[in-house]
Amino acid sequence: MSTEEIRQDPRIRLVHQLRAATVEFDLLAAEFAARHGLHPTDLRALIALLDAARAEQPMTPGRLGGQLRLNSAGTTTLIDRLERLGLVRRERDTTDRRRVLLTVEPRAVDLGWSFFGPAIGTLLTAMDAFTPAELGTVERFLGAMTTATATARENAATASP
């Protein structure tokens, strides 16, 4: 596809809208992080931990580091910082005492809801303009875009410079 054909492709508008939404989410997250003295990686870690808890999947330091693309020392520093802030705790796995699990403290959840709750309310109100069928289509679309973006990221990470 030529550059001109790409520019004319109506799907490109959706790519730009996705990028714009991503930028707005990033700016909102940056505001939260700045307000609470967090590094952007701290917030990504909290989101990863909350997502794992919602999916009922245990989160270990190694798994968290892998998701965030941090080495062992960076992961330990991150977890230590979040523990000091009272946002995360380490616990021994009750079924395998050698394994350490990470848990988000209620304080972190409360901070998140106090900041992001109004934004979520605004998003839900905006969604009221769509039918359940349209929302289903949007859900499928966003899932496909997330998968495609993850694939592009993985390909970029393995491509030679």
Image: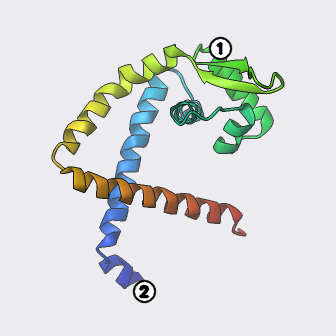
Q: Is residue 80 above or below residue 52?
A: above
Q: What percent of the width, then of the height, locates residue 126?
A: 20, 42
Front residue of 60/151: it is: 60
The residue under the point 53% across, 21% down is 37
Q: Is residue 41 above or below residue 129?
A: above
Front residue of 102/14: it is: 102
> Which of the labelled discs sits on residue 11, or is there none?
none
Q: Is residue 70 above or below residue 53?
A: below
| Image colouring | rainbow
Q: What percent of the width, then of the height, locates residue 34?
A: 47, 26
Residue named by callout 2: 2
The answer to whether residue 55 is left or right of residue 68 is: left
Instruction: Tell whether label 1 touches label 2 (CB within 8 Å).
Output: no
Label 1 residue SS: helix
Q: Is residue 110 above or below residue 134?
A: above
Label 2 residue SS: loop
The residue under the point 59% across, 33% down is 45
Which quadrant is home to the C terminus? bottom right
The answer to whether residue 91 is left or right of residue 124 is: right
Say few, some or many: other residues with alpha carbon within 10 Å of mark 2 (under 14 / 14 to 19 / 20 or more): few
Q: Amino acid at mark 1?
A: Arg
Q: Earlier in the sequence, mark 2 or mark 1?
A: 2
Residue named by callout 1: 84
Q: What percent of the width, then of the height, locates residue 89?
A: 65, 17
Residue 153 falls in which quadrant of the image? bottom right
Residue 31 falls in which quadrant of the image? top left
Q: Amino acid at mark 2?
A: Ser
